[in-house]
Amino acid sequence: MTTQQSRPMRNGVYAIGDWVLPQIGLLIAAPVLLRRLGIAQVGIWMLASAAVSSGTLLSTGFGDAAVKFVAMYRGRGDLRGIERTVRAMLAINLLFGVALSAALYCLAPYAIPRIPGLDAKLQQICLVSLRIGSALLLVKSVESVLICTLRAAERYEVAARITVTCRVVILIASVVLAFTGASAIGIMAATLCLSVFAVVVQGIAVRHALGNLLLLPSFHTETLRLIAGFGTFSWLQALAAFGFSHADRFVVAFWLGAPTLAIYGLCLQAAQPIHSLISAGLHALFPHLSARLESQPIATLWPTILAARRANLLAAFGLTLPLMLGSKLLLRLWLGQTVAQQAWLALTILALGFGLLALNITGHYTLLALGKVRPVTLYNLAAGVTMIVAMALMTPRFGIVGAACARLVYGPITWLIYLPLRRVQSQASSPTRMAMPAVTEGR
């Protein structure tokens, strides 16, 4: 296997490590945090983290555009094009980040009283945690650009080392703070400080990997127009991803309260690896194909895509079935018999939901690399809207089991992305060479 052929696989391993190592740490830390903070404060911490993650997802929704165009310019050897893209992405993310950060800061006092089960002290802790989260959201907006740039340069190992180290240190700090009697406020403050340091290190790594880029925001009109053609659909995908990844936490919090959110959030934490591990491992397909398509026709890359699809299918079944069958045992060993009795069915359903979603990953990244972002966006938006409506109807009546069941509709709807990919395959196998896709079409 040549270096070029093995690079996506190596980058996939680093991407998996980037995701899985902090998650293992969180799974280990969860029982300690439950005992030291109490279930209500763990719920508050999860709510604040979900607010930050949701805002970050929306403020960094143009991230796929960063990967696409940085990889494209790297394939052309155009360092100036890379710099223009990175600076434009910083401007876009900061603009969205400031707006969403301000919204979170200002709206928090009005939302918190609507959460059941919080006394005056817990409401204050929740308010301060969310306001610290508003600053963290802005930091994460910058961090996203730097991580996407390193991945577009196929330097996954560099991004992984920095992010894994930061997340593990944050978890260690969280456990230490919990043992010293700190509240969720202390954990959020520590997360903010450590995240600022990580962004500085990532900026240095970007300049080392790609040259002395000027990492300052720039509203270069032509570059913004190019990014907008692809990135607008990318942002809409982020909106749909918000629906699948975070909306249920808010629904559960506002209908069922922070303690129930803590239990539901821990079930999500156990089920998420099914999709996230596969997505992390196959993400390297996106920049790899984007760069290769600048010099090769899609037909020559189709064996790589088919191999990724086979691996995707096997991994989805291999991760989903054991968790569905062992959900009660896992929860009993991890969080105790009481939680296992309350939540095993929800975890089983969540595992199935994430397994169904995982089946779309190869098609998702391949279409993005081809510049066909529109069908990916439309199918994800349709799935997100359907899921949120189902969740709003089912959660008040069936609790966390209802919220989990609503997730089952998302994955099958997104399988429709394989229809346009099938057309691409037919064109690639025809005698006439397929034209290179126009990245600005957003098809």
Image: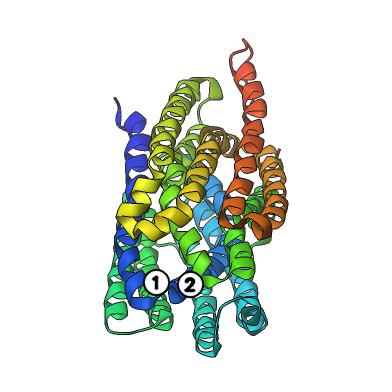
Q: Given the current orientation, which residue lies at the most extreme top position?
A: 431
The reply to whether the C-beta atoms of the residues labelled 1 and 2 are less than 8 Å apart is yes
Crowding at mark 1 (Cα within 10 Å: few <14, some 14-19, many 20+) = many
Of the numbered discs in the image, which one, if any, rests on residue 195? 1
Q: Residue at x 47, y 54 (%)?
A: 343
Q: Quadrant of residue 416?
A: top right
Q: Residue at x 46, y 65 (%)?
A: 143
Q: How is the image coloured?
A: rainbow
Q: What amino acid is at disc 2?
A: Val
Classify mark 2: helix, strand or loop: helix
Q: CA distance from mark 1 to mark 2?
A: 7 Å
Q: Which amino acid does the dot numbered 1 rest on? A: Ser
Question: Percent x, y for residue 53?
Answer: 52, 64
Residue 399, compared with residue 414, is above or below; it is below
Left/right placement of residue 337 relative to residue 258 reads left
Task: Answer with left or right where residue 107 lies relative to residue 340.
Answer: right
